[in-house]
Image: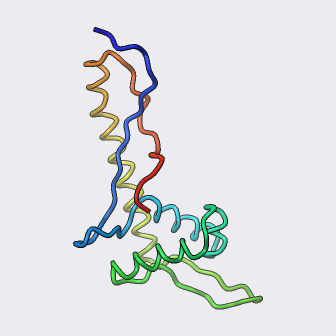
Amino acid sequence: MAIPSKQLYSRSKIWLEDADGKVVFASGRLRILKAIEKTGSIHAAAKELKMGYRAVWARIHATEERLGAQLLEKRIGGAAGGGSCLTPLAEELVRAFTRLQQDIEHETDEQFKQLENILNIKIAGASPPESEPE
């Protein structure tokens, strides 16, 4: 029996959490670190992500506390041009988490192909989730 044609997407979410169930790292924090890496500052990253500075800073601070390690190197500068850059640990975390997300999305797509045959439909592949842990 064929199911009426619909556009379907496979989705998967991953995140790291601590023993208390608090988010340590997820795709929202990944976007924050990538934006800081690109823009060179928390303020500019927050603006680019359409988030408040305090919200961005709170997520970074929570992750640093839960990891017990610094993710940003801050440069004081005021008018002379301060800013922030990623620590080597943060750079590696961004690379590793990005790679992990890509691998999981690929594997999810492969597994969902089995459903295409069962349901006689076409699944379009991974699509970014609308909401997930920050």
Quarter that holds the C terminus: bottom left
In the picture shown, does residue 25 fall above or below 73? above
> Measured from the top left, where is residue 73 in percent x and y?
53, 84
> Measured from the top left, where is residue 123 in percent x and y?
39, 27
| In-front residue for pair 50/111 | 50
Q: Residue at x 51, y 61 (%)?
A: 31
> Measured from the top left, where is residue 57 in percent x and y?
53, 77
In the picture shown, does residue 95 fall above or below 103? below
Where residue 2 sits, quadrant-wise, is top left
| In-front residue for pair 62/85 | 62
> Measured from the top left, where is residue 115 in percent x and y?
28, 25
Quarter that holds the N terminus: top left
In the picture shown, does residue 68 fall above or below 120? below
Q: Residue at x 72, y 89 (%)?
A: 78
> Quick check: 36 left or right of 4?
right
Where residue 27 sits, quadrant-wise, is bottom left
Where residue 111 sits, quadrant-wise, is top left
Q: Residue at x 35, y 70 (%)?
A: 24
The structure's colour scheme is: rainbow
> Quick check: 52 left or right of 130?
right
Name the residue furthest top: 1
> Quick check: 101 left or right of 79?
left
Name the residue furthest left: 19
